[in-house]
Amino acid sequence: MVSDIDKIHDQLQPFFTPRGVAVIGASRKTGKVGFGVLKSLVEGGVFHREGLEGFRGDIHAINPKESEILGVRCRPSVLDVEGPVDLAVIAVPPKVVPKVMAECARKGVKAAIVLTAGFQEAGKDGSELQEKFLKIAREAGIRIIGPNCLGLFYPPNKLNASFGPTLPRAGAVAFFSQSGALVDSVIDWALKEEYGFSAIVSYGNKADVDVPDLLAWAARDPHTRAIALYLEGVRDGRYFLETARRVSPIKPIVAMKAGRSPKGVKAVSSHTGSLSGSYRIYQGVFRQAGVIAADNLTEMLAVSRALAEQPALEGNRIAIVTNGGGCGVMCADYCQEAGLELPDAPPEMISRLDRTGLMHPAWSRNNPFDLVGDAGPDRYRAVLEEILTSDAYDGVIVIQTLQAVTDNMGDARLVVELQQKYNRPVLAAFMGGMISQDGIRHLLENGIPNFFDVKMAAWTMKAMYEYGRLRRAGRARGRQ
């Protein structure tokens, strides 16, 4: 029997793997949304970056006043397209959307992204227009993302069905956001930080497709290993709770809830017409559903990346390895504040390390493992080999401060090598910037999350432990 998750995934799949995409409202004017969407489909984005490619399926431009835009033939209506159109991206004035939706229904379109604003968030008249086009879509079995949204990005299929800046790098985190402008900024930031996404969806007013639907789709997406969620409100709290509870043991969900204060709640209502609700209620729902709550955007993205790229953290016993004593002390404080344990080093481990002849006479011989400022890759290797093969620790935070004798790239290479060799949870805190850039990039490109602030490393490790505990509890419930 096909589960609801499988059914919803199949319903939403035309958004991500369409045979043909039609831009209804395609424009020649560079400042128009219809131009940005078409360019993004054809070239991958309005802003070019190295390696950027456009969508490989069929692209159709719908504009009765033009014959061709960006090398794409224009047709007066979606009904004039000869081949299949699985996805329609709609960028026309609000009053025209019901007419366009009726044509999509006649064409057999399976999915539509309504970018246009001016519906539920604009008051009574807008709400009536929204209900009008939704009725047409429901009767035809068309699923709708939006209205009042940025669109979606699916790097595995080179699909940028949005008017966002560019297709992001491919990765393992699916990011779902009620705010389109936030998506724009996150993509720009992610390009600098070597952060990749399996999918990004700006869902706007969520007139049809809501957060639980996207969670169900991501649960079965082979490219997604973790889900990041920027949430202002949900339409059906019970549906969200039940879906998230089913998805979270399959894929970790990290959520940031906006609209916590009275002013924030009011702003949410005017932004997308959502009902925000009490933040305490959401916190309770998150706990019941196995969703990890993030306090801010940085935390949400950092934790999502770690959960996507690192193996599960089975316990809370953490080792800290550092070439800077002060940074190790700070990290120890933050780990203990986060409820993580820092077990002392087993005596036999210390004896073996002392016998290597690699250790400085003043090294700490305890956890945090302070290797002293002249530590090179050989010293890091000796200690990390011991930790990663020991039953005394569940995960490790590797700190590097950039000093005159530091081999930044050598340290990065060995961290990657040993993590891949032993497949144990490893986070890095290579605490530098410009000079450390090559080593940090090597870590990130090979699935090792890196943090400038050791507090963020400690709190990310805490979140990894929380998810491991939630997953174990979910497995236990499933056996009952």
Image (cartoon, rainbow, N blue to C red):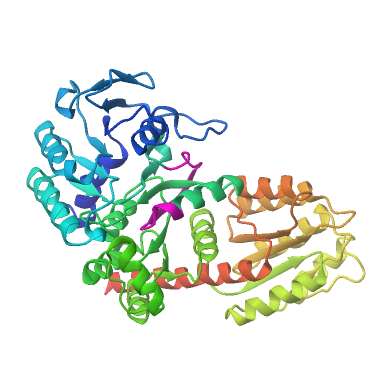
Q: Is residue 199 above or below residue 390?
A: above
Q: Is residue 242 above or below residue 37?
A: below
Q: Position of residue 217 (x, y in %)?
A: 29, 51
Q: Position of residue 121 (x, y in %)?
A: 26, 60
Magenta stretch bounds: 164-182
Does 216 appear in magenta?
A: no
Q: Is residue 107 above or below residue 216?
A: above
User: Residue visible at 73% across and 45% down?
Assistant: 438
User: Residue visible at 68% across and 70% down?
Assistant: 319
**Number of marks present in the image shown:** 0
In the image: residue 405, left or right of residue 389: right
- Give the residue at the far right of this rendering: 361
Q: Position of residue 221 (x, y in %)?
A: 34, 47
Res. 392 visible in picture:
no
Placement of the C terminus among the 4 image quadrants: bottom left
Q: For this rendering, which residue is in front, 364 or 181?
A: 181
Q: For this rendering, which residue is in front, 152 or 273?
A: 273
Q: Quadrant of residue 126?
A: bottom left
